[in-house]
Amino acid sequence: MEHTAQLLCLKCKEGALVPLSDYGSQGAAVHYKAWVCTNPDCGFNLKIRNGDIYLNEPIIAGGVHTARPR
Ligand SMILES: [Zn+2]
């Protein structure tokens, strides 16, 4: 039995957050490096890089302006 907890996306509350694993330069697996929402309309994502957490980095490059709140 695999024990996998499914996290509900806190942003849209419709999609689920699924963990993505990556592979380091040495071929070692880096587990749960990023979490993304399965709802394409939501696009919430969370990445962990070098111990820092990045929230909602734009998935699609180009065409998306970085909207800064005034
Ligand atoms: Zn979502």
Image (spheres, helix red, strand yellow):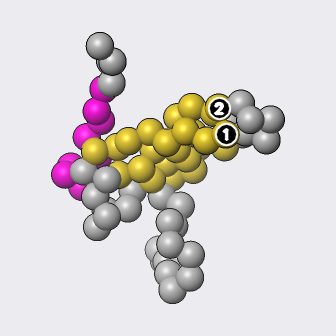
Magenta-colored span? 5-14
Marks 1 and 2 in Cβ contact (< 8 Å):
yes
Q: Tell me where residue 22 appears, x and y as whole percent.
A: 61, 41
Q: Main secondary structure of the magenta part?
A: loop
In the image, farthest residue toward the right = 26
Residue type beneath disc 1: Tyr
Is residue 10 positioned above or below 63 on the image? above
Q: Which residue corresponds to the image point at 39% horizontal and 56% vertical from the top-left?
A: 44
Q: Could you say which quadrant of the image residue 29 lies in?
A: top right
The part of the image, by quadrant, that contains residue 48 is: top right
Examine the rendering and report whether any part of residue 11 can be seen: no
Q: Report the residue at 50% width, 81% height from top.
A: 64
Circle on res. 23: 1
Q: CA distance from mark 1 to mark 2?
A: 4 Å
Q: Position of residue 17 (x, y in %)?
A: 34, 43
Residue at 79% from the left image edge and 41% from the top image edge: 25
**Residue at 28 percent of width and 33 percent of height:** 6
Q: Is residue 55 left or right of residue 6?
A: right
Is 50 covered by the magenta stretch? no
Q: Is residue 29 left or right of residue 14?
A: right
| Residue named by callout 2 | 29
